[in-house]
Image (cartoon, grey):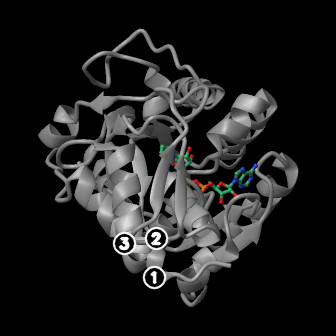
Amino acid sequence: MTTNIANNATCVVAGAAGFIGSHLTDRLLALGARVIGLDNLSLGKRDNLAQAFENPNFVFEQLDLNDRGPCLEFLRREMNRGPIGTVWHLAANSDIPAGVENPEVDLRQTFMTTYHLLEVMRALKIPRMVFASTSAIYGEHAGAVREDSGPLLPISNYGAMKLASEGIISAAAERFLERAWICRFPNVVGSRATHGAIYDFLKKLRKNPAELEVLGDGTQEKPYLHVSELVEAMLFIFQRAGDRRNVFNIAPATGATTVRHMAEATVRLAAPGARIRYTGGSRGWVGDVPRFSYSVEKLRALGWTPKLSSNEAVELAIRENLEVPKK
Ligand SMILES: NC(=O)c1ccc[n+]([C@@H]2O[C@H](COP(=O)([O-])OP(=O)(O)OC[C@H]3O[C@@H](n4cnc5c(N)ncnc54)[C@H](O)[C@@H]3O)[C@@H](O)[C@H]2O)c1
């Protein structure tokens, strides 16, 4: 099966002003699609959509997806201009520690956004959803996790609400969705980041170029994927995987990156000579999975492989984020 994105009606990107959502929006527009971006700008920024706003095929509406009535009415009006084929659902709480502090944050921003979006899609007969899921749904596993690894016992509220979202999307695929794609992202890096270790390190170094404080002991080790490759993988999966429910891990070409490596690379590129101080302990925060590795055999068998290793993706992302002056 191959789905042509430009000929495939209008699409919605929920969470369009966020880090990944804005890159996906730019790519969909470049492929000729008409894109409706939705975001409440709680974490995302209008600036991330500067390029998209120049494209006449882009429409943006600032709204909270949990306000179902206004969301439904807005999309109903947009459908007068043509059918909507796919919702790319990337809206969520991306601040994992905030969800550890207050589970309500993940319930509302990560799960309820999925629930309300699906209800809007059912009412408007929008047939397809692509969902941004995460490695956090797996919890802690020894060895490389496969899409069918289990039991799935997340250790963060964020992971739990993403897993619940996967569940309700699967149920919707039984009731009214024609097709659903669940993409389980690793850690994603690149320009326009709104959070994450590189973002935090650069922020700290701007404040104090002499010292970088790093949470944990630096041994946490995870695969990092560049956002450009993530977006290509999502598009590839959407175009090629034709089951009613499609679940894929996405990861970099090889390896994983330790927090120590990331801290040292950030210091080398942003503030040479700064001292690195580790706070100690094997994980950065409660709910942090300190070490994980992905099996991407299924994606490889579908025909997609990334080019960058985890360390290369990290280095590229540090350079990209350095180019943008921050207040
Ligand atoms: N960045 C990563 O490393 C990573 C890893 C795994 C999964 N993901 C998932 O990918 C998606 C995008 O992540 P990101 O890194 O771009 O995060 P992000 O915070 O930059 O983007 C999420 C966007 O959703 C918006 N949003 C949140 N709640 C909303 C609501 N109620 N109504 C409307 N908009 C709302 C935010 O304002 C933000 O712009 C998320 O679902 C995230 O869980 C990201």
Within-10-Å neighbours for mark 2: few <14, some 14–19, many 20+: many
User: Which of pointers 3 and 2 indicates the residue nearer the eye?
Assistant: 3
Q: Toward the viewer: 300 or 83?
A: 300
Do labels 1 and 2 touch, CB within 8 Å?
Answer: yes
Spatial separation of the CA atoms under disc 1 and disc 3? 11 Å
Q: Toward the viewer: 194 or 181?
A: 194
Spatial separation of the CA atoms under disc 1 and disc 2? 9 Å
Quick one: label 1 or label 3, which is nearer the N terminus? 3
Dot 2 corresponds to which residue? Answer: 191
Residue at the spot 51% in from the left edge and 32% down from the top edge: 280
Tell me where residue 195 appears, x and y as whole percent: 58, 55
Tell me where residue 190 appears, x and y as whole percent: 42, 65
Within-10-Å neighbours for mark 3: few <14, some 14–19, many 20+: few
Quick one: label 1 or label 2, which is nearer the N terminus? 2
Give the secondary structure at mark 1. helix
Residue at the spot 57% in from the left edge and 51% down from the top edge: 90
Ligand 1 is within 8 Å of the C-beta of the residue at disc 3: no
Can you tell which quarter of the image residue 52 is in?
bottom right
Dot 3 corresponds to which residue? Answer: 269
Q: Toward the viewer: 261 or 10?
A: 261
Residue 194's label in the rendered image is none
Tell me where residue 123 appears, x and y as whole percent: 72, 43
User: Which of pointers 1 and 3 indicates the residue nearer the eye?
Assistant: 3
Within-10-Å neighbours for mark 1: few <14, some 14–19, many 20+: few
